[in-house]
Image (cartoon, helix red, strand yellow):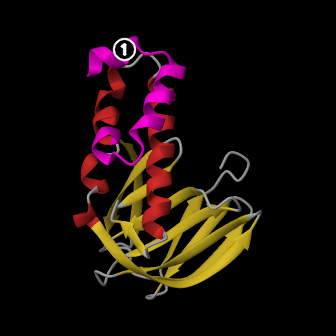
Amino acid sequence: MGEYLKNLKAAQYESLMREAGQDKAFIARTMSCAEDFRDVDGVRDMVLEKVLQNIGEIFSQEKLPTINGVITKEKYFKITMDLNNYLMELNESDFHEQYLGEENYSDISISGEITYKNHTITYGEGSYGGDGFIIIIAENNKVKWLMFHDEINPIVKLEITNNKIIGINNCGIKYEFEIDWESI
């Protein structure tokens, strides 16, 4: 499949992605082959946008995939937690098929919502006990950004300052995420 992707032009690839529809396995395979494609960034952007679309459908069912990271239309960042020092580290990583499987979905409970710059920012907890999430949805109901982690604890309060979202968990610990509102 990697050799096939090398020969596709961007327009052909977009057409193929439209035909793929909800095929999550196809998305994951395409991500793993993206390194072989001439326009790696273009492929990654198209695939991650499709993943965000799927996350929107999952969210509408009051569930989210336990991605243990942050996903945008351009990148996926794996979150590594240091629970002893209450530190969080974000590292750019590849998005893997395992995050898309239904066995990795968590039921969610919403703690609250804030509207900011024509986006709805929703936050809350997952069903595993220690997980929390923040999701940004544009006014056209498209998911633009998601943070979900199974060790961050439920996010019970949210603060927004210019280019930062600050999620506060049920223990009072604050987690800051920079947001480029112009490109989101």
Q: Left or right: where does residue 115 sit relative to residue 1?
A: right
Q: Nearer the viewer, residue 172 or 55?
A: 55
Q: Residue at x 53, y 45 (%)?
A: 73
Q: Position of residue 169 (x, y in %)?
A: 47, 82
> How would you classify the magenta stretch by its main secondary structure?
helix
Q: Nearer the viewer, residue 80 or 77?
A: 77
Q: Which residue is mark 1?
A: 6
Q: Nearer the viewer, residue 44 or 160?
A: 44
Q: Is residue 155 visible?
A: yes
Q: Position of residue 26 (x, y in %)?
A: 31, 39
Q: Is residue 41 visible?
A: no
| Residue 163, above or below 37 | below
- Let me know if residue 32 is in the magenta part: no
Q: Secondary structure at mark 1?
A: helix
Q: Residue at x 54, y 66 (%)?
A: 135
Q: Which region of the structure is painted magenta?
A: 1-27
Rate crowding at label 1 as few (under 14), some (14 to 19) or many (20 or more) other CA atoms within 10 Å.
some
Q: Left or right: where does residue 16 sit relative to residue 112?
A: left
Q: Residue at x 33, y 65 (%)?
A: 66
| Residue 153, above or below 135 | below
Q: Nearer the viewer, residue 55 or 114?
A: 55
Farthest residue, direction right: 117
| Residue 178, above or below 12 | below
Q: Quadrant of residue 117?
A: bottom right
| Residue 53, above or below 152 | above
- Let me know if residue 3 is in the magenta part: yes
The type of residue carrying mark 1 is: Lys
Q: Position of residue 88 (x, y in %)?
A: 40, 63
